[in-house]
Amino acid sequence: MLRTPSAVRDAERYTAHNYHPLPVVISSAEGSWLTDVDGRRYLDCLAGYSALNFGHRHPELIRAAHEQLDRLTLTSRAFIHDQFADFCRELATLCGKELVLPMNTGAEAVETGIKVARKWGYQVKGVAPGRANIIVAEGNFHGRTTTVVSFSTDEDARADFGPYTPGFTVVPYGDLAALEAAIDGNTVAVLLEPIQGEQGVVLPPEGYLPGVRRVCTERNVLFVADEIQSGLGRTGRTFACDHEGVVPDMYLLGKALGGGIVPVSAVAADADVLGVLKPGQHGSTFGGNPLACAVGTGVVRLLATGEFQRRSAELGERLRAGLEGLLGKGLVAVRVRGLWAGVDIDPALMTGRQACERLMERGVLAKDTHGSTIRLAPPLVITADEIDHAVAQLAAVLAG
């Protein structure tokens, strides 16, 4: 008897319905492959929204976690543990920044970035108390806390969660003139995703990110880059900003930083920015815990070799070629940067949800977003043959 139907029913019965998962129940995984409770295998083309950039159960990261589990898992930041300095130093070096502030989730990193930008605005820029403003982009996704959904333009994420936090100005993504016009004397930061993931892997217009960097420098405003999904090798470079030679004032990191094992996030910036925080002004009991730091250091060391960035760039070109070959055969648009793709299906054929359900039936797991768009973000350990397999299954779904 199959176990999946009853497991799905139990999950639906005992949990709040804040997600609409595919009806698959995973019990084990390795590399790019998942196995469900009935023994069926699936190619993972979501990678936990980039949290699994290094695949499931990467041996070096699992070893680091096991070794740390046998020694020490938590102290709180009331004390210093022996994994903390290595993690912060090596991550700061990877980012080219002076300081790191470890947290747990991506949303916490965004909230931290907002608090730091405001405090910098008051203490360094001289903005009047309570007047700080941050510019964000339409179509943004920075998390689901009450502050973050206050400036979301996605009504599903925002509706009925007010009253909303003030202090944000929304401008069209990719419109440099609108962004520059929105800056005033109270603007402390521009907060952007270099690539808008939840929106459907929307790439910035050429020259947009360098323009944002220039404007922020000229107007004495912090450029805060949310690289939680796009960073750490996903796009073929360490950071998506690297594709245009842009260095933000603050990186917001998460997802892949925990190696798919524990939630790890961080803010990286120079001392003139992160140095505005003093003891007691911000923190987290679990932020920078020993287990997180041990795994996070392992992640940083994997990235320091450049292997995963190269794999993403090279295999991303194979993914691009395969997907572009389906244009006019059920696909109406394809956006690819490294091993990250937004695929727009002809809405006359099916919705994105229907496409993902049919891919699941063919042994490939992906995620829909916004109507007839699906996202593909396989682990960076995927092989060329596996990419070809995923594209072939999508082609079969589109052909009906």
Image (cartoon, rainbow, N blue to C red):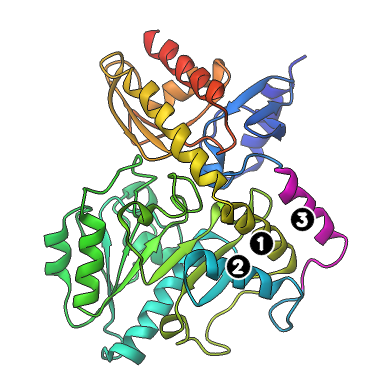
Q: Residue at x 74, y 63 (%)?
A: 291
- Could you tell me the amino acid type at mark 2? Glu
- Could you tell me the amino acid type at mark 1? Thr
The answer to whether residue 230 is magenta is no
Q: Position of residue 374 (x, y in %)?
A: 40, 31
- Residue assigned mark 1: 297
Tag 2 near tag 1, CB within 8 Å: yes
Tag 1 near tag 3, CB within 8 Å: yes
Q: Residue at x 39, y 35 (%)?
A: 341
Assign a secondary structure to mark 1. Answer: helix
The mark nearer the N terminus, 2 or 1, is 2
Q: What is the magenta range? A: 58-74
- Could you tell me the amino acid type at mark 3? Ala
Q: Residues within 10 Å of mark 2 (few under 14, many from 20)?
A: some
- Does 247 sit left or right of 101 as displayed? left
- Residue assigned mark 2: 90
View extreme (top): residue: 400
Q: Position of residue 383 (x, y in %)?
A: 57, 28
- Residue assigned mark 3: 64
From the viewer's perspective, is the residue at label 2 or at label 3 nearer? 2
Task: Using the image, determine if residue 98 lies above or below residue 362.
Answer: below
Assign a secondary structure to mark 2. Answer: helix
